[in-house]
Image (spheres, helix red, strand yellow):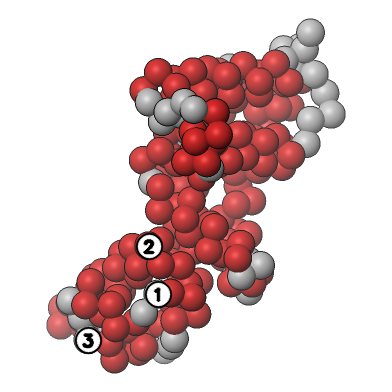
Amino acid sequence: MTRDTTPANEERLRDADRSQNTILAAARDEFAEYGLGGARVDRIAERSGLNKRLIYYYFEDKERLFQAVLEQAYRHIREEERQLNLLDLPPADAVRRLVEFTWNYYLEHPEFLTLLNSANLHRARHLDESPRVRELNSPLIAMLGEVLERGRKDGSFRGGIDPIQLYVSIAGLSYFYLSNNFTLSAIFGRDLMAPKARSERLSHMSEVILGYVLRS
């Protein structure tokens, strides 16, 4: 079937894209604030300024909409990671840049962490049902694997490092600290989100990760 490329149809397609993006942005904020269980389609419609029927037309139901929000969230962080151009850097610099990027991204996008929290409460079934998420994540692991192999070949990195395990460690060092900063600050009697504490945390994470990958 030949796609209709008349100006009128192209404008309709642009309107549809704009509407879907507006809905996704509103839904992201709703899910980040209330979680999947507490989110309401009525509020998403109000946030987006669009008719609730249009939300159901594009996304069928709240579950599908949550899945679409998760896919968009992963798509955004992976696009940002690609722009780091890690393969153009010396291996150690590339790993350090990935650590710094992950930390700063989580700081600048707290909604990403709350969306992950909600997804995990539901045992990630929305991600399990999404082939797009795996497609989005595979290039990152391949790129990190190439960085590690280059480091091994030039003698700066030790061998046998699993890129998935390394990425989980990089993400986890940032994620746990930020998602638990209130309890940790209360327990230790320190403001772990003060500028000095954040700077110290980033330095610590970089040293931990590089200390693991660099050859002694």
* Residue 23 on image: x %, y %: 30, 73
- Cα separation between marks 2 and 1: 8 Å
Amino acid beneath label 2: Glu
Closest to the camera, between mark 1 and mark 3, is: 1
Residue sitting at x 55%, y 34%: 187
Q: For the residue carrying disc 1, how many other residues have a C-alpha within 10 Å: few (<14), some (14-19), or many (20+)? A: some
Hey, which quadrant is residue 42 in on the image?
bottom left
Identify the mark nearer the N-term, 2 or 1.
Answer: 2
| Mark seen at residue 39 | 1
* Residue 205 on image: x %, y %: 58, 24
Judge from the rendering whether residue 167 lies leftward or rightward of residue 180; answer left or right: right
Q: For the residue carrying disc 3, how many other residues have a C-alpha within 10 Å: few (<14), some (14-19), or many (20+)? A: few
Q: Secondary structure at mark 2?
A: helix
Q: Nearer the viewer, residue 135 or 209?
A: 209
Hey, which quadrant is residue 177 in on the image?
top right
- Cα separation between marks 1 and 3: 17 Å
| Mark seen at residue 33 | 2
Amino acid beneath label 1: Ala
Amino acid beneath label 3: Asn
| Residue position for label 3 | 51
Identify the mark nearer the N-term, 3 or 2.
Answer: 2
Hey, which quadrant is residue 80 in on the image?
top left
- Cα separation between marks 3 and 2: 21 Å
| Mark seen at residue 7 | none
